[in-house]
Image: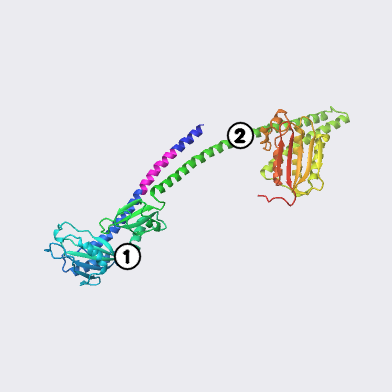
Amino acid sequence: MLTGAVLLVLAVLQYLWVGDLTRFELELTERNLAAATRGFTRELGGVFQSIGSTYRVRRGPSLDQELFDEYRSWRESTMYPGLIVDAYWIDAEPADSPALTPEYRIRRARLDEAALVSVEWPSAFAPIERRLADSVDFSLRPPSRVPREWMIPFDDDRWAYVVPQGTLGPRGWAVAILDHRVLFEGLIPALVDRYFGAEDQRDYRVRLVGGGDPGSRVLYSTDADFAADTGTPPDIRRNIVDAGANWAVEATHESGSLETYVGWHRWRNLSLGIGAVIVLGLSFGFLVTANRRAQALADRQMEFVAGVSHELRTPIAGISSLSQNLADGVVRDLDHAARYGKSINAESHRLNAMVEKVLRYSAVRSGQYRYEREPLDVGSVVESELEAVRQSSGEEGRIDVTIEDGLPPVSGDAQALRSVVGNLISNALKFDPRQGKIAVGVRSVGREIEISVQDSGAGISAADRSHIFEPFYRGQAAHAGQAEGSGLGLSLVREFVKAHRGRVDVAAEAGDGTRFLVYLPAAGTESPSG
């Protein structure tokens, strides 16, 4: 009862501990994801800011020289010099113009020299023209206000990064043309690996969306399914700050969501914890059961010692008394002396049989018993043992034997099989207070030889039936009738039959006698030992 209460308390504490651990793990995972997303957006935004800083010109000696010097400085400091593949300068109207006109002069900046060359408006600049039409006059912008950059697709494999100029420099717009492949196949995947882990170690699916709003077009994704699933809210979403791209990065755990991942960990930890409590309870139960069995075995061993001591004392006392009378000359008549000798011989046989049984059981249990296997006629073995039992017990008329002709041989140890038959017949004689008949039969049953020993005694009670083959066990009938024995006979029977790859069954109802059945495989039909 106390153990059950302790295990219940442990289970409750484990449940509460797992709940606290789950909350801590969720908070820690969310913080780590937020830190990774923040680092990703900061570094990607920093790349765009460096481009904006490069193309926001000041009052230098000349516009073309300043653009060239700034680009060269940027190229020497960046890890992705191939990101900018082209550049343009769009001039604004003079400062006295009340508004910007639709016509702007555009010049192309040669990246390999300090030169601006006038060109026709490229057809791909149509989105830029529309955006410029909505721009505000530079003359109306306060000196402290710095216009933000903006990015739009330029064509299929390039993006245009437009940098409006401030009030301190020349009025206009610088346009840096970015390589799509360098951006989405080099720069962004490298940042994803750096902040979210390499592909084979990454726990999150990451995507970059354009437009800045949930459900916007996916520009890049680490997973095709995640790219297509724009309707499911991600675990985290963060805009690219001050980048002019109006982009956002979204990430979600590969399991579907952080809640799913942490919930799975919660149930795993809870299962492990409850499993540990269950194992602890089972272990305690096994320990209690083993202790009870050890105590029961110790009790039986003590009973065995007491029984053997009593059984040894009886023949020893008889032998001692009879031999002492002979030594003292109490018996002078030859007939009396012969009877004394016969009694001494019987008691010595009894004593020897008991000692032999104990030694044999010890050898069998320790694995030191050596089986001398040979082809045997089971009928002859049974008849030989029956003859020995008749001579030692004097119960010749009580034993009926039926042996089937033409039995196949059995591969076995003759001494062990004789011990099996002798123990079964001795028990039948010993526990039959009615002095009824003992029926012994040997026959072939399929590919096995059956040896049966049937008595007409009191049978075996249901309480004793499951224990009769245990060593040192003596049932209620043995204790009530004070029958001689050590409780080892049937245990030896089971061990010897098992060693011959056979089996032993018992049919016994209280009051209806007992029938033991031994089945031995015929020679050549034994199953391999396992």
Residue 126 vs 395, above or below: the answer is below
Residue 321 vs 361, above or below: the answer is above
Q: Please name the amino acid that badge 2 sits on.
A: Gln
Taking depth in this image into account, of 189 and 217 the one nearest to the observer is 217
Magenta span: predominant SS is helix
Taking the image as shown, residue 123 lies to the left or right of residue 365, namely left
Q: Could you tell me residue 114's position as x and y percent?
A: 21, 71
Q: Which residue is mark 1?
A: 180
Disc with the residue nearer the chain's start (2 vs 1): 1
Q: Please name the amino acid that badge 1 sits on.
A: His
Residue 429 vs 29, above or below: the answer is above
In the displayed image of the protein, which residue is found farthest to the top?
A: 330
- Which of labels 2 and 1 is toward the front? 1
Taking the image as shown, residue 44 lies to the left or right of residue 469, namely left
Q: Which residue is mark 2?
A: 295
Please tell me how crowded label 2 is: few (under 14), some (14-19), or many (20+) other residues with Cα within 10 Å.
few
In this orientation, does residue 53 appear?
A: no
The quarter of the displayed image where residue 159 is located: bottom left
Residue 125 vs 465, above or below: the answer is below
The quarter of the displayed image where residue 360 is located: top right
In the displayed image of the protein, which residue is found farthest to the right?
A: 334
Verify whether residue 99 appears in magenta.
Answer: no
User: How much space separates mark 2 and mark 1, taking CA atoms?
Assistant: 82 Å
Q: Could you tell me residue 199's position as x and y percent?
A: 40, 58
